[in-house]
Image (cartoon, helix red, strand yellow):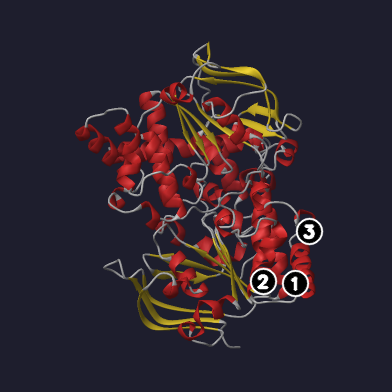
Amino acid sequence: MEPIIEFQNFSFKYRSQKEPTLKDINLAIYPGEKVLIVGPSGSGKSTLAHCINGLVPFSYAGDITGTYRIKGEDPAKLGIFGLSKSVGTVLQDTDGQFIGLTVAEDIAFALENDRVEYHEMRGRVDKAADAVDVKDLLDHAPGALSGGQKQRVSMAGVLVCDVEILLFDEPLANLDPATGKRTIALIDELQKAKGATILIIEHRLEDALYRDVDRIIVVGEGKIVADTTPDELLAANVLAEEGIREPLYITALKHAGCEIRPETHPAHVETMELSGYKEALCRWNEKVALPEKKPGDDVILSVENLAFSYDGRTPILTDIHMQVQKGEMLAIVGKNGAGKSTLSNLICGFLKPGQGRILFGGEDIADWSIKERGEKIGLVMQNPNQMISKPMIYGEVALGLAVRGVPEEEIKERVYATLKICGLYQFRNWPVSALSFGQKKRVTIASILVLHPQVLILDEPTAGQDYRHYTEIMEFLKKLNEEYGITIIMITHDMHLMLEYTNRAVVIADGRLLADTAPAAVLTDDAVADRAYLKKTSLYDLAVRCGIAEPTQFVERFIGYERQMRAAEREEEA
């Protein structure tokens, strides 16, 4: 069988860069394969994808050495239009992919450009919409849809052309855990039904492995450092060496001194052969102490009987009660559209509640202006493009200090320090437009962190970031929290973040407060996880399958142990 995608001794250097981004790539992908591509930010995995869909070299110019073929043909001769007949791409930022005013118009866009007859077009749009379960949304505006619905509409927009290669650029980045599972399941169904070649670029390895893949390609520093099966990869040390997060159940087994072997089929905790690991894991569980509960502090922020509706008829939030303690690190979780971001906008004053009140330090802030609230509460929004207002990175991060009259020398010092923590110092003189989505997100986080607010609200702070940058930012937030007493509230779909860095989780489902408890309790409760579109942690499944009597306590022990290890690492670095 001939490869459908083939690279031979291939290198690529952007015109604006001194060094090549891709170096001596040799890769063959065959028709019908499902391949997962992972790697840290800046590794070259997105550039590799851009070569496949034609953005390199037609949109991003550069120098190519070696050869590559798509369906046996030279992409340079096909052109980006010709490649689009074979390769369909679903972008990470789905909002940047929409063209039409309705879902139907958006799905039909490519067909309209091809001058397809109306009746054929209608049939193909219906078929594509039906394949991804958005047929009932055809007359809706794309901007009014949830994150998961937008993802499916983007899929329909490429399926309508019957392409043979489907490329998904971080499809899970902006989705709640349950919707992410359904997305991975849908991609799997499409591959089986159509026999398409599937390429998935994703940071969230454990979630991406919810369904089988044929191979995992690990890209590091512009080179392919691994091209193997999931079982072989999880038994090797490549992920840790490349700064990629391994599944939590694999980490737990390693903490217990277990050697992961390919023959145990470690790609899925549900079917992994664990008989040889049970005794060691149970011993580890008995040895590790439960983390101590920290006493509560004074309440800094209170939400009382809060309700809100955009149109006065459909409730978005109903009877929300919540207290946030000074110096706390808190997670707010729930499915897309549950009302989490609306709650943060109410706290910051961008929206006015229909009923109830919000107190800061015991004072009702109903009469506070947005600026007055901004002096106490900083908000980092989910979509970085909605926050960025300056063309250059340095100027964007410095803006908040500049408008407050901070001296230029102090601005420079604080901006540089923040950029270093956020992994952006080397880009300080770059235009924002040259950054990836994840890098733009880090710019917006830096622009708020540089102000040192008393309360910091972050809407999806780690979306689109690799494990190294995730850890750097979260450790920085933890440092702000512990050393400066800044209260941090994180709205997140990242259950790893919630487990690792917070001691309390507020769960919102359908506009109501569903739970307010420890993260481990949330992710080991079937009823809460199902209703809030969350996903039980694989640590729970591991504990149950190994016969541990208190799986929730096992999760808590794992969290406490991980935190102790990170604290020890920080001390060594200091």
**Which of the 4 image quarters holds residue 477?**
top left
Q: Position of residue 573 (x, y in %)?
A: 29, 41
Give above or below for 552 relative to 141.
Answer: above
Q: Report the residue at 60% width, 66% height from top.
A: 263
The N terminus, quarter of image? bottom right
Circle number at residue 135: 3
In the foreground, 526 or 394: 394
Q: Report the residue at 46% width, 64% height from top.
A: 46
Circle 3: residue type = Lys
**Which residue is the site of mark 2?**
112
Q: Position of residue 5 (x, y in %)?
A: 53, 80
Give above or below for 140 relative to 553.
Answer: below
Circle 1: residue type = Met
The answer to whether the residues at label 2 and label 3 have Cβ atoms under 8 Å apart is no
Q: Could you classify mark 3 by the number of other residues whose Cα lies within 10 Å: few (under 14), some (14-19), or many (20 or more)?
A: some
- Viewer-side label of 3, 1: 1
Q: Alpha carbon of mark 3 to alpha carbon of mark 1: how far?
A: 14 Å
**Which of the 4 image quarters holds residue 305?**
top right
Name the residue at the left extreme: 409
**Which residue is the site of mark 1?**
121
Q: Position of residue 360 (x, y in %)?
A: 51, 16
Residue 536 as seen in the image, left or right of residue 348: right
Give above or below for 195 relative to 468.
Answer: below
The C terminus, quarter of image? top left
The answer to whether the residues at label 2 and label 1 have Cβ atoms under 8 Å apart is yes
Circle number at residue 506: none
Circle 2: residue type = Glu
Q: Could you classify mark 1 by the number of other residues whose Cα lies within 10 Å: few (under 14), some (14-19), or many (20 or more)?
A: some
